Amino acid sequence: MPELPEVETVRRGLEPALVGRIITRAEARRPDLRWPLPERFAERLEGRRIEALARRSKYLLAHLDDGMTWLTHLGMSGRFTVFARDGGATTPLSETPGAFALAAQTAGDAGGGRHDHVLIETDAALLVYTDPRRFGAMDLWPTAEIETHPLLKSIGPEPLGNAFHVDSLAEALDGRSASIKSALLDQRRVAGLGNIYVCEALWRTGIDPRRAAGGISRKRVAELVDAIRAVLADAIEAGGSSLRDYRQATGDLGYFQHRFAVYDREDQPCAREGCKGVVQRVVQSGRSTFFCGRCQR
DNA sequence: ATGTGTTCCTGTCCGC
DNA sequence: TGCGGACAGGAACACA
């Protein structure tokens, strides 16, 4: 589900509710998401103060006051929902059906909170992690060595940071026979891109997604760097893309989906000024790719 | 080392 | 309306 802009939107939504707050109670309602949760996960969160909420690629990183970082990946269907606590409520988290019913309702989950897997209570808010497909993940890792986490250590440069530029991308693509579409989805080349924003960036640059990654001219790689930055910035500004059930942590919908040029627009006219092409869908490495066969070369 | 196909899981939508 | 199949924002893993 969420790509970099959606995760950044979630981070910004959670930040005011979480940073500086103390986790008064935590509950894992099952022992695993995609993988087993760490030993004594909920107990190790309880009593901790959240010092900062950061993002690396599609991972949320909550830095705690004991030197550990609580790491979360939302997978395809994970989401956080925040509920303000009523003043002075002392009801145990597991006995607040009202809040859970509200969480389920907001999530559009007819199962009555069946997929609400992790619950976090702070002195100010109730945080519910919901993930029907359970492709998400959580872990605890020392903050000082967070970049050595197995899930983070091979991830490429942040596309909105200084380490991502024409030289780094050209080197990452050099000599590769895989398609540019597949290469950009590979998190080792550049962090945080997923199916939507790869398709959109390639459309903005006019590059055929089926072209070999290593055969793209330096000039076009430079244009691709700019297009990736621009499409991510535009999407963050719009609060991300709301497809199906994605919502911001505030419950608001993002609206970048209304600005898609090609993603999920098979058979619709190309949005480029003067182009008479039609959006096509092909499958590359098992994923749908949307592009205009006329203006993307 | 690369590239690709499979797999995890549940929900939704579309055609018959 | 029910049923089966395709498909979904991810990415680790197995295997050529």
Image (tube, coloured by chain):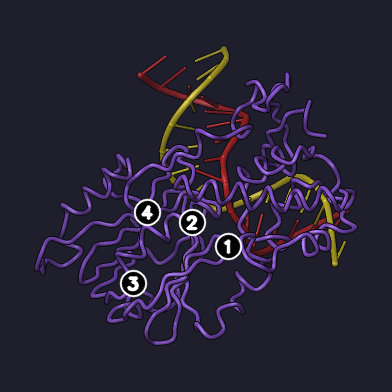
Chain colours: A purple, B yellow, C red
The quadrant in which residue A261 appears is top right
Residue of label 4: A130
Residues flagged by tags 2 and 3 on a common chain: yes
- Whether pointer 1 and pointer 4 mark residues with C-beta atoms closer than 8 Å, the reply is no
- Whether pointer 3 and pointer 1 mark residues with C-beta atoms closer than 8 Å, the reply is no
**Helix, strand or loop status at disc 1:** loop
Residue A179 placed where, x, y %?
Answer: 81, 46
**Helix, strand or loop status at disc 3:** loop
Nearer to us of marks 4 and 3 is 3
Nearer to us of marks 1 and 4 is 1
> Does A205 appear above or below A139?
above
Within-10-Å neighbours for mark 4: few <14, some 14–19, many 20+: many
Residue of label 2: A7
Q: Chain of mark 3?
A: A
Residues flagged by tags 3 and 1 on a common chain: yes
Q: CA distance from mark 1 to mark 2?
A: 8 Å
Q: Chain of mark 4?
A: A
Residues flagged by tags 4 and 3 on a common chain: yes
Nearer to us of marks 2 and 4 is 2
- Quarter of the picture containing the C terminus of chain A is top right
**Helix, strand or loop status at disc 2:** helix
Amino acid type at circle 2 is Val
Q: Please state the total of marks drawn on the protein image.
A: 4
Q: Chain of mark 1?
A: A
- Whether pointer 1 and pointer 2 mark residues with C-beta atoms closer than 8 Å, the reply is yes
Residue of label 3: A19
Residue of label 1: A57
Q: CA distance from mark 2 to mark 3?
A: 16 Å
- Identify the mark nearer the N-term, 3 or 1: 3
